[in-house]
Image (cartoon, helix red, strand yellow):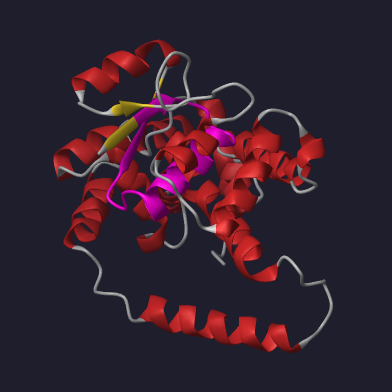
Amino acid sequence: MNWITRGQPKIDRIASPWLIKNFIDNEAEFIYVPLEMVKEKAKEMNGIPFDIPDVEFSHHKDKCTFDYIVEKYKITDPAIHTLAIIVRGADTDRHDIAKQASGLWAISAGLAYNIKDDYELLEKGMMIYDALYSWAKYLQREKHTENPVDHLLIDVFNKFIKQKSAQKKTPVWVKVLREIIQDQIDTNLSLTNISKSLEIHPSYLSREFSKHFNNLSFGEYVRKLRIEKAIDLIKTNNYSLTQIAYLTGFSDQSHFTRIFKQHTGKIPSAYKKEVTKGKGYTKG
């Protein structure tokens, strides 16, 4: 089922998808659109609008969307009820109802500030609720001191690592996607457009991308390849920096200069001068 809500999520619009995925529908897909398009998009996709005014799955009285989903689907897990109070406190600025609420707000606000892509934010944000749920279910009475539980957690972690390493082979779409990016590195690449050619939903593609591309987001990976291509072109000494910016898909010279310095520590002109002198740049 498709669930549609407004973009730029922070708390309830990440906590609720986590709850739905883990306790209601593990095949659920989440779509973020501008507020004014939520109901129209939900109707178009036969989806469920949530966390906006005047829909069923939303705030009711002093409770938030997460609370409503818990009540609607009669989720009885005590850890979820603990988590619901924390989410409600953070989402409605009532940090007095749960001492963890202010921390959840701080982490969520910081994460949303650092990550502007809604789907990447959802992927990273879900890890917060995985952690909070584990704390609520197993660790509420634990203190930050060494004790036998530490060894238990290490065992759980080791099992998790083994499970991850035993996962099935790299999906076919990963190889195709890698080739598309390589072939179109000098164009205005869009994850949404690429997802159409792969016939994969953009939210799934965004969520799975970093698992197969060196733990980098789509944007980070593309910028890395563009800078590597720029370095190769500089070393040939056949192109001006303006031409190299164009050939590597940067929208303008200043953008190219800023990203190049982030990756190499030098502006392109200084880097080119060092290459000319035979020093160059060693990728680490």
**Segment tinted magenta in the rendering:** 4-32
Query: Does residue 134 lie above or below 80 as drawn?
Result: below
Percent from the top left, x then y, of residue 43?
A: 23, 18
**Residue at (32% x, 38% y) in the render:** 191
How many tags in the picture?
0
Residue 220 at x, y percent in the picture: 48, 47
Q: Residue at x 48, y 15 (%)?
A: 53
Quadrant of the image for the C terminus? bottom right
Q: Is residue 203 left or right of residue 87?
A: left
Observer-nearest of 69 and 34: 69
- Which residue corresponds to the image point at 42% horizontal and 38% vertical from the top-left? 72
**Relative to 259, is 168 on the left or the right?**
left
234 or 76: which is nearer to us? 76
Q: Is residue 6 shown to the viewer in this render? A: yes
Q: In the rendered structure, does residue 21 fall within the stretch colored magenta?
A: yes
Q: Compare residues 94 and 207 and report the one nearer the observer.
A: 94
Residue in the image at 66% along x and 43% along y: 85
